[in-house]
Image (cartoon, rainbow, N blue to C red):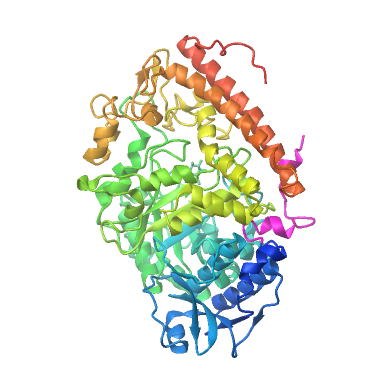
Amino acid sequence: MVNAAFAVWNGTGAPPAASETEAWLRYAPRDAESAKPYAQLPSRVEVLHESLVLDSAQKELIAGMSRMLGRSVQAGSGGGNAFLLGSAPEARKRVPELKLPALKPDGYWLKVTRSRGQRLFLIIGSNDRGVLYGVFALLSKIAREQDISNIDEAEQPFARLRWVNQWDNLDGHIERGYGGPSIFFADGKVRYDLTRAGQYARLLASIGINGCTINNVNADPRVFRPDFIPQIKGIADAFRPWGVQVALAADLSAPKVLGDLDTFDPVDPKVAAWWKNKIDEIYRAIPDFGGFTIKADSEGQPGPSTYGRTHADAANMIARALKPHGGVVFYRAFVYNHHLDWRNLKNDRAKAAYDNFHPLDGEFDDNVIIQIKNGPIDFQVREPVSPLFAGLRRTNEAIELQITQEYTGQQRQLCFLVPMWKEALDFDMRINDKHTPVKALVAGRVFHRPTGGFAGVANVGMDASWLGNSLAMANLYGFGRLAWDPDLGPEKIIEEWTRLTFGNDPEVVRTIDRMQLSSWHIYENYTGPLGAGTLTNVTGNHYDPAPESSERNGWGQWHRADREGIGMDRTLATGTGFIGQYPPAVQKIYEPLASCPDRLLLFFHHVPYTHVLHSGKTVIQHIYDSHYDGAEEAAGLGEQWKTLPGRVDEARYEEILALLEYQAREAIVWRDTICNWIYQLSGIADQKGRVGRRSQP
Ligand code: GCW
C-alpha cells in the first residue's frame, strides 16, 4: 500500500509546488495591517559593487519585500532613501562618517541611518557572503513581524566552517536519505537540470551554511575522473551565487582504483603528485572549491592502514595539495573496528575515535579538521558527547551532527534534534577544571586553533519538502542556526522556524513549538531508555524495534541486556575504561553510580533491573513506564495537531496529520516490542500490570 503522505517525488512528472520547496523562505504575503510597520522601508535597493553573491542578495531582498509587503521595490542607484548593500570598505567610501563595527568573515551589520538627507538602510558585510546573510536576516525579521525601524545589529558567525554533508551516491540513491533521490546525481552522472541544487544553496545560505560536500563519504572514486570534474563544476556554478562552496568526499584509494597508479600509499611521492595534479585540475574548473571530506579505514573504506601509515600521513598529504588554493580537509574520526569480539567485555566501540586520533594530536596540518560525531557511538537517541572533543588540543576539530534522522525515526516520526545538539554543544568538558563547553572547542576558541566548525549530515532529496516531511525541516534550519550561533536556545530557534514556515498565528506557533520541543524526549521514551541505545534494528533498517540485533555481533552497539541486568560497563573500575577518556572532572560524574545521571546510566554502567534510579524508580519499571508514557505522548502529538485545521493550509495539515497518526501507531509497536522483550528477559512484572497483556491500540 502506498500512503500518499510518504510518497516522494521521483523526479518525473509535475514538480512540487514552489511554496513547499521554499521551506522557511516562503515570504507569505502580509495583510495591510501587519505590513504597516514596514511602510517606511525604502523602495530602492542599491548594491555598492558588482558580484554574483551581491546580485543574489539584491534579488532576494526585492523578491522578499515585494512578496511579503506587496510593494514595488526596485534595483538601482540614485538619490533618495535606499537599502545599501555592500562590503565594509565600499560602505565606508559611500558613507564616510560611518563607524563600522568589527566584522569577522561572513559577519554582517544591519543599520538604519541618515546621510545627506537620505534615509539609508545599510546591509553591510565583512564580505559578499556577509551581505547576503544580512539580507536573509532582515527578511526573516520582516516575516516574523519584528521591529526593524531603528535597527543597529552586528552578527558574527561563531565558527568559520559551517558545512553540510550529503551522502549521495552517483546512481542517485542517498545513503540514509529519506527525502527522495539525489538532487545532484542520477544514473552515474550529475543531473542535467540542477534547479534544485540552486534552490538548496539558497536555503543553506539563508541559515549561514557556507559549504556542502555533495557525495557520500562511502565515496565513489569516479568523481575524480576527468569527465566528471566538469560536471561537478555545474553544481559549483549553481551554488556560487549563494556563497556555498562545493566539496567532495574522497576515496583515498582513487589513484589506484582509477588505474593511474599501482599504490595509494600516502607517503609515496607518486601518490602525493597524483593528488596535487588532481586538485589543481579541480581548481582550474572550480576556483572556489572547498576541499574534501574523508572517511578512511572505516566500515570497509580504504585508508592509510593498508600501508601501515597514519591518518595524519593521509590527511596532510591531501591538505598540502589543497593549501595553495585555500581548501581544507575534513577528516572523519568515525573510525572503528566493526568486527569487534563481542564476548570480550573489555572491548568497546565507544573508545575507537579517541584511541585512533588522540595519539595523533598535533600532527595534523592547519587546514585539516577532524570531524567528530557528537557521540562516541553513532547518532543514537541518547549518547554522551565524544571525549575526543577534549582529546585534541593542537588539532582543528568540527562536530558532526546528523540532520537526517537515521536512528531517530527517519523523518516519518517527529524528532526535533536541536535540544539534543544543544546539550552536546553546551556540555562542559571541564578541561583543567575550567569551563570548556564543546561549542568553544569545535570553534577552535579554547586552544586558539585557526579554524573549526560544524558539519551536518543533511541528505535532502528531490521530495518537495526536501526531507520527506515538512516538520523535519526544522532540523536543517536548527542546524544552520546553531552553527551560526550555538548560544541560541531551542525555544528561540523553533519559534523562528515555525513563524517562517507556518506564519505568525500565535496558536499555531505555540502548538507547533510545543510539539517540536517535546518530540525528542517522546521518541527517546518509546524507543531506547536510559542511554541504552535506540534498541533499533542495528544490522538492518535502523528503524524498527529489534533490541537483540545489537548483540552477538561485531558492530559494537551492545547494550548487554541479559537475565540479570542491562547496560555497558564503561567504568574504569570494572568496565571497558571508556570513562577514562574524559577529563578528570567529567570522569567523576560518570564513574560513580551515585552521580551518573539516569538518562545515561545504561551507557556507562551495567546494573541489575532492580537498581533504583535517582528518580526513585527501578530500572525495569522506568523502562516500562517510559515506553507507556512515550506511546501516549506520541498519540498526544497528533491530538495537538488536530487543534489546527483551518489555521494551517490543508495540504500540509493533512500530510502531517497522516504522519502523526502513523507515528502514534509505531510508538505502540515500539512500546510493546521493547516491554515484552525486557519482560521475557528479566522475568520481572510491570507493577502496573500492563506488560504481557494483549495491547489495545
Ligand atoms: O551510522 C553509519 C551509517 C552509515 C554511514 C556511517 C558513517 C555513510 O549507518 O550509513 O555511512 O554511519 O557515518 O560513515
Q: Is residue 595 above or below residue 408?
A: above
Frontmost residue, 85 versus 234: 85
Determine the main secondary structure of the stretch shown in magenta.
Answer: loop
Residue stretch rendered in magenta on the structure? 1-26
Q: Is residue 630 left or right of residue 308?
A: right
Q: Position of residue 399 (x, y in %)?
A: 40, 51
Q: Is residue 126 left or right of residue 397?
A: right
Q: Position of residue 695 (x, y in %)?
A: 64, 16
Q: Position of residue 255 (x, y in %)?
A: 45, 60
Name the quadrant of the N terminus: top right
Q: Is residue 589 above or below residue 170?
A: above
Residue 671 sits in quarter: top right
Query: Magenta includes 433?
Result: no
Q: Is residue 685 above or below residue 214?
A: above
Look at 34% across and 49% down and name the residue there.
438
Judge whether residue 545 can be spotted in this image: no
Q: Is residue 267 left or right of residue 97?
A: left
Q: Is residue 64 left or right of residue 134?
A: right
Residue 654 sits in quarter: top right
